[in-house]
Amino acid sequence: MTLLKAVRGTRDLLPPETELWNRVEATARRVFTRYNFGEIRTPIFEDTQLFARSVGEETDIVSKEMYTWEDRARAQSEKSQSLTLRPENTAGVVRAYIERKLGEAGLLRKLFYIGPQFRRERPQKGRYRQFWQIGAEVIGPPSAGSESPLRDAEVLEMLASFLDELGITGWTLVLNSVGSSTDRPRYIAALREALKDKAPQMCADCQRRAETNPLRVLDCKVPEDQPIIEALPRIADHLDEDSKAHFAAVLAALDACGVPYTINPRLVRGLDYYTRTTFEFTHGGLGAQNALLGGGRYDGLSEMLGGPRAPGIGFALGLDRLILTLQASQSDAAPNLADAFIAPLGEAMNAPALTLARELRREGLRIELGDGAFRLKKSFEIGNKLARSIILLGEDEHRSGILTVKNFAAGEQVRVPRADVARHLRP
Ligand code: AMP
């Protein structure tokens, strides 16, 4: 029989790595809560139209990377429907904002999410078909201040604080403005015009993008195309006064609070819904897939989905890549040992050992429980691999209430009254 394996581009996350994942997620929850964000959990699959309308039909994500299937009707009352595993989470959040009327209170909604996303990309280091994102969105009616450049700067400052708190050094914040929903189409028209002559000299992808999604030409990494791209019109020269003032205010607020950044006039990002501020945080240690996170403003997205006017800004951070970055800087991390391994001496001691384990676990200690069928030598061998100390529980210890505890590193064996064991074990 052929052995079944995890599907290409997916993988199992195992301990102790999952402890690192949990630590990062806990840090995100703690930091985002300080900024008064609350958690949202949207469905893993949505109507395919949601992504087609928001992310955009011509993007790589929608045109070739989505996991889509036709969900057949099971009853006469149901219709068959095209469904898609979410490739990103902003569309789902904005769908929920509209459907659940989250703007009705007239306040900003500040929501974060943590969860898996799915894209059929070519797998490589830092790029998977099921990957995890931590993201956040600030969205609301304009009267709540959702269009203010202060929102952009606050989100960027929160991200800088989050990475700092995780101990990630060496990140770079790269910023650009892709213009508003009025000046962006003007720029795209200028780009299209300039590409008429140039595209035939460019790579096959660029030739296609020049037709379907000219902004994506700026993303091209093919070396031969770079001089042509450098000479293309720049979005900065096509911004209207409002967009220019917005971008300048974002930069001024970042300068004021000391968050460093660089401006890249070619940063356009792959999703159609972005307007004005777009950004990425990159990290040199990641190699080719160097974007730790990306995001931007999406002032027209709610309306694209049939909702009320609700400007917003958000980001999505690649958790898989963040973990790779942390692992690279913590390669010598000590193994995560239990506080003690309890060795019952004989099977009659199994039940008393479970009672002792229960007491110590309720004290908050991490306890591994052996088995009375093991010989003493085997208990020591296993205990040494899993825990910092071993507790021997034989008839004598059970009757007298004085336990034998050995710390493996110190090599010393001591007798400790049962009531003092938790204190004795605590690191
Ligand atoms: P995007 O939704 O494309 O803006 O991506 C936001 C972030 O998610 C990126 O900066 C990456 O860190 C991460 N990401 C996107 N696609 C993948 C993938 N296939 N595998 C791992 N991480 C990804």
Image: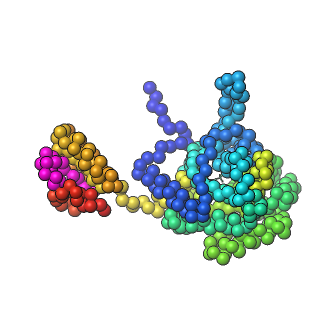
Residue beneath the point at 19% across and 38% down: 347
Q: In this view, does 402 lie to the left or right of 189?
A: left
Quadrant in the rendering for residue 250: bottom right
Residue beneath the point at 23% across and 45% down: 353
Say if 203 sits above or below 243 in the image. above
- Residue 129 appears at what percent x and percent y? 59, 44
The N terminus is located in which quarter? top left
Which is nearer the eye, 286 or 20?
Answer: 20
Say if 321 sits above or below 244 in the image. above
Say if 370 sits above or below 136 in the image. above
- Which residue is situated farthest in the top direction here? 76
- The reply to whether the magenta stretch includes residue 262 is no
- The reply to whether the magenta stretch includes residue 402 is yes
Tell me, yes or no, if residue 169 can be seen here: yes
Q: Is residue 187 left or right of residue 370?
A: right
- Which residue is situated farthest in the bottom direction here? 256
* Count of numbered tags: 0
Which is nearer the eye, 153 or 240?
Answer: 153
Quadrant in the rendering for residue 43: top right
- Residue 109 appears at what percent x and percent y? 67, 57
Tell me, yes or no, if residue 283 can be seen here: no
Which is nearer the eye, 235 or 207?
Answer: 235
Q: In the rendered view, how is the structure colored?
A: rainbow
**For the magenta stretch, what is the residue range?**
387-403
Quadrant in the rendering for residue 242: bottom right
- Residue 219 appears at what percent x and percent y? 71, 56
Residue beneath the point at 32% across and 51% down: 361
The C terminus is located in which quarter? bottom left
Residue beneath the point at 84% across and 56% down: 185
- Residue 355 appears at what percent x and percent y? 25, 45
